[in-house]
Image (cartoon, rainbow, N blue to C red):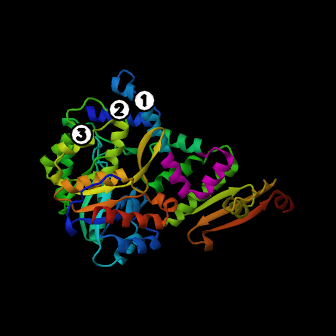
Amino acid sequence: MASVTIPNIGPRVALATTYEGDDPALLERIAPLVDAIEITPDTIARSDKKQSHLRSEVLNEYSSVGSGKRFMAHGVGLSICSADAWNDDYLGLLDELFSRLDVEWHSEHLAWTTFGGESTGTMFAPPRTEEALDLICERVARIQDRYKVPFLLEHVIQLLPEEAAQFTPAGFLNAITSRTGCGLIVDAYNLECDAHNQGLDIAAFLDELDLSVVRELHIAGGVQLNDFQLDIHSRPARNSTLHLALDIIARASNLRAVTYEFLKEAIAPLGHDAICSELVRARKAMKL
Amino acid sequence: MNSLKYRQEGLLSLIKGRRIDRSDPYLESVAQCRELAMLREIAVWWRKLHVGSQCRFTARLLKRLGIFDTLVSQYFNNNATSPYIEELSLGFLSSLGAHANAVVRAVSQFEWAFHKVRAGSGDRYEVCWDRHPAKFLCALAEDGELPALEDGVLYRMTVGGDIPGLFECVRESELDTVAS
């Protein structure tokens, strides 16, 4: 591993991880290893008669970890970039979550996952156009009016060929954050996926991006399929991902958390031991 | 329709394998790219995972019959699938209600009714089987040999939240009918 200068960031940056419920043995093991827990409201919800609600048994699990643990909400289903309508139901889940737990900030993927109420089955990044920018900024403003904690957006990987854009990838994010005042999540692994699949110049991206608005950093490991690097978070983070994360930590002056993400479906193949080892490794590598 | 809506409607059609406006150069380029096939594969893979976790008996039966992947893919492509796992699963089970195979119909209807009851429905649901349902479901769960069709026999199962164990079953035989 190449030598990396680790910044003296002190205790201000929390280590966080995903927990989506139904595995109290895992929660018991990871809780002492992290400062904060990332909650994805959509994945702890149950839908019935076109309305979804958070599962109280999972909310009780979060409450059981005791004071001192911090919580962040990270949605997947708002579909903030859907041209017709976002998913109002998701906001109902957020309302429930905020009424039950102290959530420090909340975030969503900069993507659309539904059109006409129909699920696409995947996340599509929006085109980087003025039209999309206007739509996104208007919706971010509505979210900021509704919830008084910071709101962050996370870039998603781009798998399909892009059409003509009016902004660079970093320029589009800068335009959103400067217009709305919202924050960003940078996902180090997603950047590696875009570099592998689309030839993204990560260094140029980070040079252009306003890193002062980056509040959270995601690390993860994924899989390759048919030569594509996919954002299916099912593996330990690669050394290269941690190196990239360290570079971002050194430059993101307002960073508050580094989150190791893994899918609930990956818990069994990864195993509790590997997840815990990954958290210990991340804290040590990044001096969190 | 603004350009964003037009574009998203087109991309949704592409991932669902539906017709698009072939005169649009961008959509046409996406239709031809290998990344689209990859995205479709991932989208269907997730649906299979969700259906498999929510509809355990039906998924096991369809996998034994070698038609699980095809049916989930068809359901995803041809329906306005919900982003919610529960609704996706109920929709998929409903789609099997007219399947040619009587056992597929019975297992999917049973599982659909079971989901409804567990979600709090106060209704009762009837499912007809041409073989012993409890033995059939046990064999599915344990990867055992499936019980054979019983000629002239009908098992009338009732699923309801007010029934101990959530379902009960009555065996009716043509011979019983003749005798009576």
Start-end of magenta stretch: B45-68
**Tag 3, which secondary structure?**
helix
Q: Which residue is mark 3?
A: A169
Residue at image coords 49%, 60%: A270
Q: Do the residues bearing badges 1 and 3 touch, measured as CB atoms within 8 Å?
A: no
* Label 1 CA crowd tier, 10 Å (few <14, some 14–19, many 20+): few
Q: Do the residues bearing badges 2 and 3 touch, measured as CB atoms within 8 Å?
A: no
Residue in front for this viewpoint, B150 or A42? A42
Q: Which residue is mark 2?
A: A161
Question: Is residue A113 in view from this perspective?
Answer: no
Q: Is residue B9 magenta?
A: no
Quarter holding residue B24: top left
- Measured along the vertical axis of the image, is residue A223 above or below residue A260? above
- Measured along the vertical axis of the image, is residue A226 above or below residue A47? above
CA distance for labels 1 and 3:
21 Å
Three-letter residue code for mark 3: Pro
Question: Is residue A235 in view from this perspective?
Answer: yes
Q: Chain of mark 3?
A: A
Q: Are marks 2 and 3 on the same chain?
A: yes
* Label 3 CA crowd tier, 10 Å (few <14, some 14–19, many 20+): some
Q: Which residue is mark 1?
A: B33
Q: Is residue A104 left or right of residue A27?
A: left
Q: Are marks 1 and 3 on the same chain?
A: no
Residue at image coords 29%, 70%: A35
The first of marks 2 and 3 along the sequence is: 2
Q: Is residue A209 left or right of residue A261?
A: left
